[in-house]
Image (cartoon, rainbow, N blue to C red):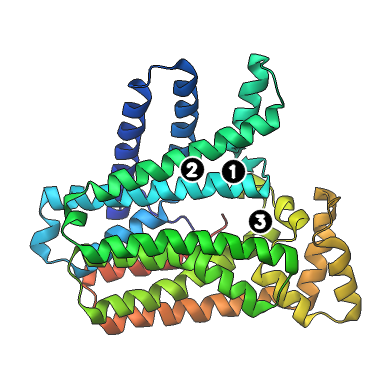
Amino acid sequence: MTLIDEFTESSAVAARVNGLLDDFLRERTTRETHPETRDVLETLRTFTLNGGKRIRPLFCYWGWRGAADPDAYADTDACADVVAVAAALELFHTAALIHDDIIDNSDVRRGRPTIHRALGTWHAGHGWRGESGAFGQSGALLAGNACLVWSEELFHANPLVARDDRARRLFARLRTSAVYGEFLDLVGEARGGRLNDALKIIRHKTASYTVRYPLQIGGALAGADDTLMKAYDTFGLLLGEAFQLRDDLIGLFGAPEVTGKDGTDDVRQGKPTALIALARELADPRQSARLDLLYGAPEFRADDMGALRDVVTATGAPEAIERMIEDRHTDAVRALREAGVERSALAELESLAAAAVHRER
């Protein structure tokens, strides 16, 4: 299942976000006087626009639609302002991906070389002094920082945001939560942990910044009352957890040509996923020994993936994770229905929720 269908309002919103980002990044590129900087900005623009589900912009937009007066979303200027806020969230996401790939030393993102790999290749192609890998990582760190600056610029220059202190506070929480989640992910790799530890990471790193806060930012911009904001909070956390649990399954069992990412990276680094944490808790002694041998092994190869999949499946963890996904999905949708979200927005949010948890990439 894809996140958005071709002819829905969500597809139109995603297209408008893409168009705004394209214009914004092209403008930054064309006004730059240094050719080397223009090359990097063009690489960054291509990375931002090619691929990605635009899930954060969509939840921001529909959070606004679910709380807005019908006259508000008929207002062209107001709608354009919400799309600009949504684009700011996507730029933050671009920064987070770039920095995450540096931390994980990943080679591929969205079926293409990661930014630090692309810049390393660019450095090598020029025959410049120094180590290309180190140059690529440093350049990508700066590229990610640029996206953070631009995200701030787009968000805080917005007239809707200027009038809404709640939205500004929520944007700060979104960014802080993502940083804390990334740090907890590092701790989990170094220390290991149980299922509850993995779920704490999910709440910070994925649930809050993917669904919860984008949805609430949209609601705040529309003047949502406390009851609806609480429903958005519940929906966002539950669906965000379900989204990441699906990612855990896709990471181990998905095909790289579909996911656009090499799953062996996470295995070699010993990523503290909920799937692996649960598999360890359910494993018998023989299965536990096999997991210890395979998961987190620096020499893990693609050829070993079948053996790891077999032992994880044998523990029963994938089926348990599927149940956790369905339970969270059901409870998330119930929270929205009970809050009396505007009918068309509710239907679209339910559709997005289903697509977020039933997908292959």
Label 1 sits on residue: 109
Labelled pair 3, 2 in contact (Cβ < 8 Å): no
Q: Dot 3: within a 10 Å radius of its alpha carbon, few (fewer than 14), some, or many (20 or more) residues? A: some
x and y percentages locating residue 223 in the rendered image: 17, 69
Label 3 sits on residue: 254
Q: Quadrant of residue 18?
A: top left
Residue drawn at x 39%, y 75% as measured from the top left:
235
Label 2 sits on residue: 51
Secondary element under disc 2, as helix, strand or loop, is: loop
Q: Is residue 115 left or right of residue 152?
A: right
x and y percentages locating residue 169 in the rendered image: 31, 64
Secondary element under disc 3, as helix, strand or loop, is: loop
Given the image, on which type of amino acid does mark 1 rest? Arg
Q: Dot 1: within a 10 Å radius of its alpha carbon, few (fewer than 14), some, or many (20 or more) residues? A: some
Q: Quadrant of residue 175?
A: bottom left
Question: If you read the primary sequence from the N terminus, does the residue marked by circle 2 or circle 1 appear first?
Answer: 2
Given the image, on which type of amino acid does mark 2 rest? Gly
Question: If you read the primary sequence from the N terminus, does the residue marked by circle 1 or circle 3 appear first?
Answer: 1
Which corner quadrant holds the C terminus?
bottom right
Nearer the observer, disc 1 or disc 3?
1
